[in-house]
Image (tube, grey):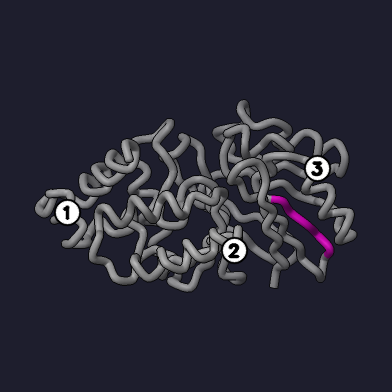
Amino acid sequence: MLTILQLPVLNDNYIYLLHDPVSGETAVVDPAVTQPVLDVLKQKGWQLTTILNTHHHADHVGGNLALKQKTGCTVIAPLSDQNRIPGIDRGVVDGDVIMLGKHTAKVISTPGHTSGHVVYYFADDNTLFCGDTLFVMGCGRLFEGTAEQMWHSLQKLKALPASTRIYCAHEYTQANGRFSLTVEPDNRQLQQRMELINQLRAKHLPTVPSTIEQELATNPFFREDSLALRETIKMVNKKPVEVFAEVRRLKDSF
């Protein structure tokens, strides 16, 4: 299995280091900054071989050039963002496969938060690195894409195995959970989950990773078919994508 280290940086970002102990290869996902990554590499005695970017925002690519200069690593990022992501060596599109040692990741295109956003799904390792497309009990704001695009992107992620671990790029869970309770106040699983999340955050512990199974039960952006949610927001007879769009609108003003 991959060794996965989670590095909290900036106000609420997570950087992920992925290490294959067999090949010795190491990747970093969305390096917002440089020094914390270099510190862990030195501590562990690892050599950085790959950067995986999900999208072009500065808090996901800020460390690209310095890390590439210091380590000689290869930058893999969405092809459509080749002019917006510094240091890109290989542009990837939906369905492409990348390797880290013998570990295989499938590239899944997930436009919505940005037009070129992709995620990396390591099926054999049961892990998804989803950037800002999916959060614990949330999803990314629609900066460049439409609600319909984001809804279709999330449908792809909903279809992954329920046990898939979700490694998202921000610690937004408490705020997301507070909103979720406004659209599904009687969801008992959501209530119980928020109790645990509040306990974790009180101790400054991460709420990430989550799983697809947990999100199906508690994430309103995965629950457009929930009758209780539809009744709360008065959209019982609307299309699923319309329900999703209304939930996103409500969250934007929460």
Query: As shown in the figure, which amino acid type bears the numbered disc 1?
Result: Thr
Q: What's the residue at 78%, 47% (across, down)?
A: 36
Q: What's the residue at 69%, 34% (across, down)?
A: 62
Q: Residue furthest front?
A: 202
CA distance for labels 2 and 3: 26 Å
Percent of width and height locating residue 78: 58, 40
Report the predominant secondary structure element of the magenta stretch: strand
- Vertical comparison of 221 with 10: above or below: below
- Tell me: 119 left or right of 75: left
The magenta segment is 24-28
Describe the element under mark 2 as helix, strand or loop: strand
Percent of width and height locating residue 69: 85, 36
Categorize mark 1 by other alpha carbons within 10 Å: few (<14), some (14-19), many (20+): few
Q: Tell me if label 3 and label 1 are in contact, CB under 8 Å.
A: no
Give the labeled residue for mark 2.
122
Mark sitting earlier along the chain (1/2): 2
Q: What's the residue at 82%, 51% (across, down)?
A: 48
Give the labeled residue for mark 3.
35
- Tell me: 189 left or right of 33: left
Quadrant showing the N terminus: bottom right
Mark sitting earlier along the chain (3/1): 3
User: Which mark is on residue 232?
Assistant: 1
Residue 154 seen by the camera: yes
